[in-house]
Image: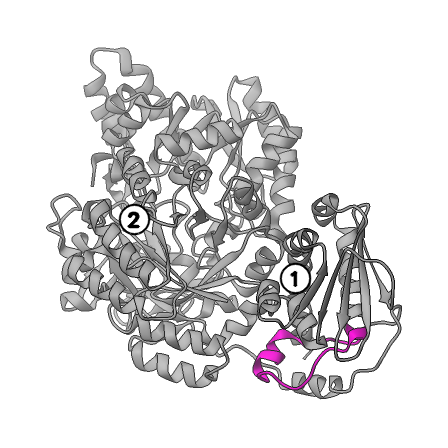
Amino acid sequence: MKISVGPAPSHWGRKKIRKFYRELAESPADHVYVGETVCAERSCFSPTFLTGLCDTLRRAGKQVFASSLILVKESERFCAFRELAELVDGIEINSPTFLSLARHHFAIGGAFLHVHNSVTANSMAARKVNKIVLPHELGLDTISLIAGRCSVPVEVVVHGHIPIGISAACQTARSFRRNGEGCGNLCGRYPEGMVLQAGQKPLFRIEGPQTLSAATYCLVECLSQLAEAGVDTVRILPQLNHTARIVRIYRDVLDLKTDCHDALKELKAVCPSGLCNGWFLGKAGWVYESPHMPSRRVKSHARSVMPNRKPLDAKPQRCISETDRFALKNSCWVHSTDDIICEVARLAETMNRDSRFVKELAGFKRTRLVLSATDTGRGFLILLDKQRVTVRPYSDGPFDVRIRASEQILWDVLSGRMDADAAFFSGKAGVSGSLITAFRVKNKFLSLLQKQLACRLAAESESFCKSE
Amino acid sequence: MAAVDAGADSVYIGFRSPTNLRNLPGLNFSLDQAGEAVRYAHRNGTKVCVVVNTHPTNQQLDDCFGAIDDACDIGADAVIVADLAVLEHARNKHQHLEIHLSCSAGVTDPEAVRFYQEEFGVACVVLPRVLSLQQIAALRQQTDVLLEVMVFGVLCANYDGNCCLSSFITGTSANSIGACSPARFVQFEETAGDRVVLKLNGVVIDGSVGPNKRTYPMPCKGKYGNLSRSGRLHTFQDPCCLNALPLLGELAAAGVNIMKIEGRQRSLAYVRSVTNVWRNAIDALDRPDNVTTRMFESMSLEPVLEGMAGTLGALNGG
């Protein structure tokens, strides 16, 4: 998974913002969002200033995206944003006002576009939105469903003071009994917002017209579930200090260099206002609970260490979930080729029944994809023809594309754990036959297969947890 | 019926399901009731719009699609929709159905209006309650779509469709379930001296409320201690009711086509008196004494205003 960093509030002032992005340039963030999303009046993102930031970040290998306003009250804001859009690698659209710009720029649908279901997500995709940031209030179930069925990658906010509402009136000014006009940039005095307490409990944080959570939303313990759901990018929202360090912590957890419990301890030290993750768990947003990790799962792993060789028509055994694989950190366990065949055959069956997938497969005419395991010499054939997927064992015969790799790598590529390009370029997988067909298979079929798998794993993991 | 009798040109109704943003117990229409309502309204020359304006999750999509189909079956004149998936269903399945864009789609400027007009042929846009009169007038200059403005009723503190205050406290999304501060989370805790603590899902919304001031605990109407302002209480919004009657002439001059009164969740007497006053005020717009009449009419609405105070909300730039 990639890591992105959301836009820093521009009332920090140019000096703090420059320092912030200089530090971020050193961090392992992949994508960086810049711009004012909340209050047009206070924006300091002029084209010149933005160009300077872009230079710093691009030199460090980051992709830079400009985030739009959430609430647009004056029509001239459209032209101003269109001008900024020319300077960056892509735009994040936070208001329907800017949706028409998706035709001309690489566009990311922001979290404020209300994508609560996969049909809406695909409708955005059909209108040239290349990636979708899901609304903050969605739980894992909804995230999995959307990520599993959406034709473009999905990004989820995993860390930071999370936006809860945006008002027409400036709440910071209101607390001084002033209205937004001529506010004298009061919000600049509170770079981390003003904390509001409900009874004795810090609950909200007001920051200009926006309301954020008082606590820091933190999904560091849930990253494996997000990976399993098929989420492409996780987003960290900036805080005044330590953002680069937070990015590093998340990167280390994703790369399995740090245990998520150690990471949680480190994060608690740099997020003094406490943590919350309730929305992700389907609970009230302010709650923090450690996500449930059923211990019996480890037994299922033990059972799978010696996989049974079973014929295709046999009921496939429970395959180990991504959560376990993640928790067990690169265990020696691999899927046997037969397990993989069973799995792919089962997915193919589901795909054949689903009209959406069938439509996507229309472009393939008698395409034969062979996957051979180098360590066992066994292989299987996936035939894409007449909008159907057929899977059968393979020993010899003609093919259009053949992928050769170890069982582990084959499974990692099929399940989306490893990028197919990365496997090829790092020499872990060999491809013979037509490269053009290989790319088409990768872009169309593999991504569908991975989404289908993520969906099924999510559903399976849910029913498993219920049965516990 | 009360709204139709009192002279509304159109009325909006919702089905009894999580397909509209007032999915509260005891409110809304069953399919039979809705059919009857449409027949009654049409006999009296009133249009009926069915509201299907939640942002549904995948599991709720079929309900929303079904609500659109039902609205067509009972002969509704238009549907009010916010979500792209529902919009697409309405446009593709029912080519001739008139579509209005709900305020929770958050459309506030001509570019966004153009997008929804071109993509879905929306006939009317209900504006979120975040724009000033000047901003509405400027928008009017740049689009030919029918503009509908909320002029009376509940005033949300936040930009419509983007408020998760209730969701943050209770864990149920108002945007997709359709209910802000669901009743099952509400607690009134008695304290000394007849005072009560208002709680929502265990979170204190108002620490001390006098015996005659009990209100339904909405997060945006709560009182919170502001730690940066030495404990001063912060409210997102005063407990008052939007009443744009004093601006009726200006709204009409700005080119607003439809004045929307919040009627669901309200008593018959309320709906009857408010609709009546607005009907008379709009009919009186062409008469030379309309300013005096409006002042008088505005006075007569005060007993029904929530918190007994009226406000112009964002309309006057505040």
Q: Position of residue B83 (x, y in %)?
A: 51, 42
Circle 1 sits on which residue? A450
- What residue do we see at 50% from left, 48% from top? A130
Circle 2 sits on which residue? A167
Q: Pick the quarter of the image with the C terminus of chain A.
A: bottom right
Residue A331 lies within the magenta run? yes
| Drawn side of residue A214 relative to residue A419, left or right | left
- Please, what is the dominant secondary structure of the magenta stretch? loop
| Drawn side of residue B263 relative to residue B308, left or right | right
Q: Position of residue A345 (x, y in %)?
A: 80, 63
The part of the chain drawn in magenta is A317-339
Assess disc 1: are there few (<14), some (14-19) or many (≥20) residues with their C-alpha within 10 Å of its C-alpha: many
Question: Subunit of mark 2?
Answer: A
Q: Which amino acid, by three-letter code, is at mark 2?
A: Ser
| Drawn side of residue A399 relative to residue B211, left or right | right
Q: Position of residue B15 (x, y in %)?
A: 58, 40
Q: Nearer the viewer, residue A203 or B14?
A: A203
